[in-house]
Image (cartoon, rainbow, N blue to C red):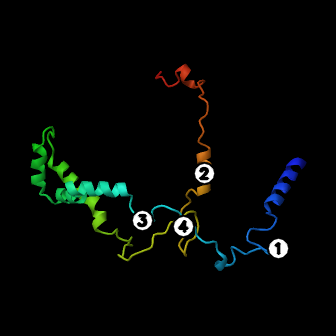
Amino acid sequence: MTGEARLGVAAAVEALDMAAPIGASDGEQLDWLGNPEAALPVERKPGTRAGVPNRRTARLRDYILARYRHPAEALAAIYSMSTVDLHAQLRALPGAGDVSAAEVLRIQVAAAGELLPYLEARRAPENEAGETVVPVLNIGVGVVSGAPAAPRGMSIDDIAKAQADQALSAADDSGSHDEGSHDAG
């Protein structure tokens, strides 16, 4: 900092009376982080409370559901319909072409799969004995909980180094292909 700039900053600090910490009196500094009672009050900002849906989205949802059935209901109707009946209805559609029964069954399975997370919670992982286990992500090589060391794999550092070495080099056109070394003789 130059001398002029230093004088300007010092003059600004004196002018704003910022020589003492904010909130301190008589040279005493407040302990904002160590004392939970001294925490700064949370300022209430204007706006919508957290978790409240957007009004425009709510109006659109209400509009669509007042006129049409819920998409989950449509998916349920597709997967619960007899495969033979759904096959006949799809084949009757103009431009549907020849829809196979296997394709109809795939459509029903996809509809059931789309709806399933809304009906059933995902099952916890289980081991071979059927006991619920906590999934563990093991990164690195070595002994974990008394288990034998895993075969040597790539650590995160190895991967980073390998990715760093992925630059392209200039083409070398002076190979042996000019002489026809691979030609049958």
- Which residue does the numbered mark 4 point to in the structure image? 44
Q: Which of these two is toward me, 163 or 150?
A: 163
Name the front one of labels 3 and 4: 4
- Marked residue nearer the N-terminal end (3 or 1): 1
Amino acid type at mark 2? Ala
Quote the CA–CA distance across marks 1 and 4: 31 Å
Quote the CA–CA distance across marks 4 and 2: 45 Å
SS type, badge 2:
helix
Disc number placed over residue 51 in the picture, else none: 3
The x and y percentages for residue 162 are 59, 48
Name the front one of labels 2 and 3: 3
Amino acid type at mark 4? Arg
Quote the CA–CA distance across marks 3 and 4: 16 Å
- Which residue does the numbered mark 1 point to in the structure image? 27
Whether pointer 4 and pointer 2 mark residues with C-beta atoms closer than 8 Å, the reply is no
Residue at screen point 58% across, 52% down: 159
Q: Is 27 placed left or right of 174 in the picture?
A: right
- Marked residue nearer the N-terminal end (1 or 2): 1
* Residue 89 in view of the camera: yes
SS type, badge 4:
loop
- Which residue does the numbered mark 2 point to in the structure image? 160
- Marked residue nearer the N-terminal end (4 or 2): 4
Q: Residues within 10 Å of mark 3 (few under 14, many from 20)?
A: few
- Marked residue nearer the N-terminal end (2 or 3): 3
